[in-house]
Amino acid sequence: MKLKRIVQFIASAITLGNYPAIWQGGIYQGPLKQGCVPILNCWGCPLSLFSCPIGALQHFFNLHLIPSYIAGFFGAIGTVVGRMACGWLCPFGLFQDLIYKLKTFKMRMPKFFSYIKYGVLIVIAGIIAWISGEPWFCKLCPAGYIEAGIPLVLADKTGDIKALVGWLFWIKMAILIIIINFSIFIKRFFCRAFCPIGAIYSIFNKFSMFQMKIDKEKCINCDSCQAVCPMHVPIQNSPHNIDCIRCLDCVKKCPTKAISYGAK
Amino acid sequence: MAQNKKNLIASIISIFIVGGGQIYSGRIITGIWFMIVFYGSILVTKVLWIQLTFGFWFVLAAWILFYLFNILDAYRGVNYFAPPCEKNCPAEVKPWYYINLVVSNKISYPFIPFFKILGMICPAPCETNCTRKGIDEPVAIRTLKHGVKTEPPVVAEKKRKERVAIIGGGPCGLTAAYELCKLGYQVVVYEKEKFLGGVLSAYIPEFRLPRSIVEQEIEQIKRAGFEIKTNVEIGKDINLAELITDYNAIFIASGAGKSAGLGIEGEEQVLSGLDILERIKNGEQIRLGKVAVIGGGNTAFDVARSLLRYGNEVAIYYRRGIEDMPAEDENKTEADEEGIKVYPYTTPVKIAGKKLVMVKTQAPQGRKGKVEIVSGSEFEIEVDKIVAAIGQVPYTDFLNDYIKIDEQCRIVTKDGRTSNPKIFAGGDAALGPQTLAHAVGDGIRIAKKIDRFLKGSLFNFKFTIYPVEPQYWQMVNTPRLKVFHRNAQERIKDFKPVEEIPSAEDLKNEAKRCLVCPLRYKP
């Protein structure tokens, strides 16, 4: 197994590490919840030990505050490694990686889709959250739905939460089915098209300390890097691509060793 | 065909059971996942159902989407992203796939017109882009075509009413004729000469491409069952207007058969390269003495090498560098081995009797930049004859009244369609002189366009279905296959083929060098 896959599994096991919840139920509410993971992971999941940064960001927006804590957190990680956390730590990314491995026909995503995530970040997680005072991205998030929404409602014994199931629950379900559907046929569909955390990190991809480097003289334009890339980035043409998640699969697979990763 | 049926059954199963078709075709985990998502979400909905809200309609839409994708997937099966060899092939061949078939020794590569000939005279853009090039040397993709057993040509069971006329029996025309016959159209091919095959039978010298192979290949294509009218010239024996009324569609693939002129003083004494090649192909022994061949394309090298074989003294003059010559690398190196001298950066300016005045030139790298003459660098050489092989121009005078033609005599086309909606054009007549691979590819593509035009359908839902699952093997470190070339001193005495076709064993070993990019480089 690839080192990346092992790290992904270990990271997911730690982020979703509140195992007593399996037999006890309920949400972990200890001191760790005050910290954020650098990736998309719902804090409402019974297994979750940490908070979600995009949830925290919207929480500050709801209170009409500037989220300097979250901005510094994203900035610190982004300036060092860029979007690396997406490739190595994110459980929802791992989930999409795994279902893309299924043997089906495969499609390619139109390029303009990768700009939708900025709209999601600015409009849904930004403006709407500021005005309405509610975390609207979390209300639509498919990762939150699969991690928190379904298990909490199904495990509910008292019937209080079940009674809350309304139109929003069904819309979230529709979003989840559509995201799963396209993730089977398209590489990391949610990460590339909709993820607001990816949108924040991608701004730092150009300036981060560690960068992808292409040796143009060694490159033979075989496109194997694009073929193995979980984000389908044409790395041979654009080493600072906004969608590059620094998973380093291409470094391994390049037949001429033309791609390297290192400090600027 | 059997695979098609299997996929159809799989898709029908998928209509009734989501994921069932995938399991039927052997993709068990995929099928189970489809079932979990679809039936799982239905179960969740049933457990949590309270009352109907408008949000439920979104879920219904998502289910329908998922359901349709499930049927589509069951029908279509696994597909692979195109590796560089496939992406760069003008003839729409899938090299990685037939290499796979050479190793597994299965006969299931569909019939492609002129497949064996492509294995002899293609410039092989697939090899220059091969991934293996980064490790040691590219796989000998072109030579490997000799190891592929293709299926016999398809003969349509049901004939359609529509009639298509094809002008020109060259590679592009015959390919289109075969592709259209396969779809059931009634095709008539009009050819000016006595024989079919165009450039292949008329010009390419025997030592590069024996005529017997061309005849075999054409014999196979003919089995598709189209009508052939040789010795009929459009504009002379029959009018294009008649064809337009008689047929539902017309495809012009008349090629580029007119030699371009030098445009200098004393041009009347210059011989045309195509003319000489045709005379030699017809068995005439041409003895001219000292010959200067002007040009850097395949025609120039073919003329030079053919004349060399009759004992003439030959030299090639070209106005750009040797790397910029449009001729195939193989043709260049073989000519070099045979001892033909090439003088780059020279061009003729005047011919006076047996004296040829030449001048030195300057040109930037690549074939696009402007060639400049170095003033005061004139020099004279003495030759018996001058042969010009500086390019060909399509012969399109007979079309002037019907469709648009540009200044270089090429037919103006857009996606294969000309200014007359009934007339399609392709091959050298539209593209200018190109390779055989381009002609075959154009024939295949435009046949599809004509089919869509005659059927009048906007959408074309046809997917590539791979009849055999490709294999994967460990990388082997054997060196590239060396194709045996006859000794240069010996081969300049006769017209027998220069290259020897390698044995089946060698071809199989070479095929194992392929990295199988679509399988190796997947995430």
Image (cartoon, rainbow, N blue to C red):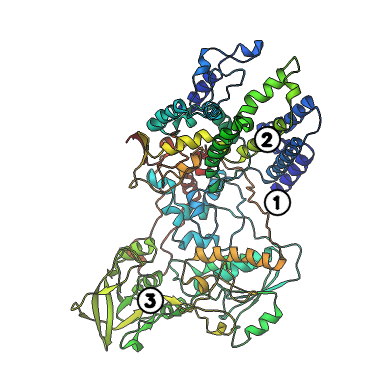
A172 or B226, nearer to the observer: A172
Question: Can residue A88 be seen in this snapshot?
Answer: yes
Q: Which amino acid does label 1 sit on?
A: Met
Nearest to the observer: residue B379 or residue A14: A14
Same chain assignment for discs 3 and 1: yes
Q: Mark 3 lies on which chain?
A: B
> Which one is in front, B490 or B77?
B77
Of all residues, the one furthest to the left in this rendering is B376
In three-dimensional space, the C-alpha distance between marks 2 and 3, rounded to whole angstroms, equals 64 Å
Residue matched to label 1: B1
- Say which residue label 3 marks: B389
Left/right placement of residue A198 relative to residue B385 reads right
Q: Mark 2 points at which residue?
A: A177
Residue at the spot 50% in from the left edge and 73% down from the top edge: B199
Mark 2: which amino acid? Ile
* Residue B167 in which image quadrant: bottom right
List x then y, in percent, for residue A6. Answer: 49, 24
Residue A203: x and y in percent read 44, 38
- Circle 2 packing at 10 Å, graded few (<14), some (14-19), many (20+), is many
